[in-house]
Image (spheres, rainbow, N blue to C red):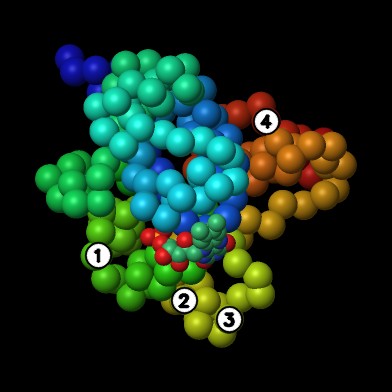
Amino acid sequence: MTKDNFFKEKITLAVTGASGSGYFLRLLASLVEADLQVYLLLSDAAKIVLRTEENEDWPEKISELNLFLENRFHAKTGQIIVLTAKDWFSPVASGSSAPGKMIVCPCSCGTLASIAQGLSNNLIQRAADVVLKERGKLIVMPRETPFSTIHLRNMLTLSELGVTVMPLAPGFYHQPKTIHDLQDFMVARVLDHLNIPHKISKRWCE
Ligand SMILES: Cc1cc2nc3c(=O)[nH]c(=O)nc-3n(C[C@H](O)[C@H](O)[C@H](O)COP(=O)(O)O)c2cc1C
């Protein structure tokens, strides 16, 4: 039995250079807490945004980064697997081994366009392309304002392909008091869509 078998499920989490690093930090923590094994893909721009918004400077070297994230998120050994942009031999790059679920959070409009056009120019785009061709569950969480017609067209293209387009636009009916409350609103919604149990926030009418 490999250490992969110790986890409930596998999932791919891609992080791109749109604003909202705090969302993915909360999301990653929740996926770890739910005992999922996470293939984590970070674009270069995502690392810049993370530094800018959260003052977090993560190690560049992948072996160091894996260890750092295990400590940072109280994950089990091997629970978070960081992949680089050209890891073409990784499980997420092929339909024969990729997890059936993938989240892009936050999703830049650049990556949104690339996925909508099937470019597969880096591992994030390729992994999304694989989930699409295998008819898995892909959730993209774009952030931009206002959206241009190009952005909206790309979202429509993805939606027509069965992708869940979930803009990072939290509600306020739960009377948030902190930024974490707003982030948790979005994290709860995405976990609901993936049938991943959580106790984060109340649902409508609860
Ligand atoms: C601090 C910062 C904030 C950004 N915010 C956004 C954003 O909210 N939405 C977006 O689409 N791009 C945003 N960008 C631009 C993207 O990072 C840029 O287009 C990048 O090429 C995206 O590359 P990626 O999709 O490979 O991560 C931001 C860039 C920086 C440095």
Q: Residue 74 at what x, y percent from top left? A: 47, 17
Instruction: Tell me residue 167's x, y (percent).
Output: 60, 60
Dot 3: element: loop
Q: Earlier in the sequence, mark 4 or mark 1?
A: 1
Q: Which residue is mark 4?
A: 200
Q: Mark 1 = which residue? A: 120
Which of the two labelled residues, at mark 1 and mark 2, occupies the earlier sequence position? 1
**Which residue bears the numbered disc 2?**
154
Disc 2/disc 4 C-alpha distance (Å): 31 Å
Where residue 82 sits: x, y (%)? Answer: 30, 36
Which numbered disc covers residue 165? Answer: none
Residue type at mark 4 is Ile
Mark 4 vs mark 1, CA separation in Å = 34 Å
* Quarter of the figure that contains the C terminus: top right
Between disc 3 and disc 1, whose residue precedes? 1
Quickly name the residue at label 3: 148
Q: For the residue marked with disc 3, what is the amino acid?
A: Ser
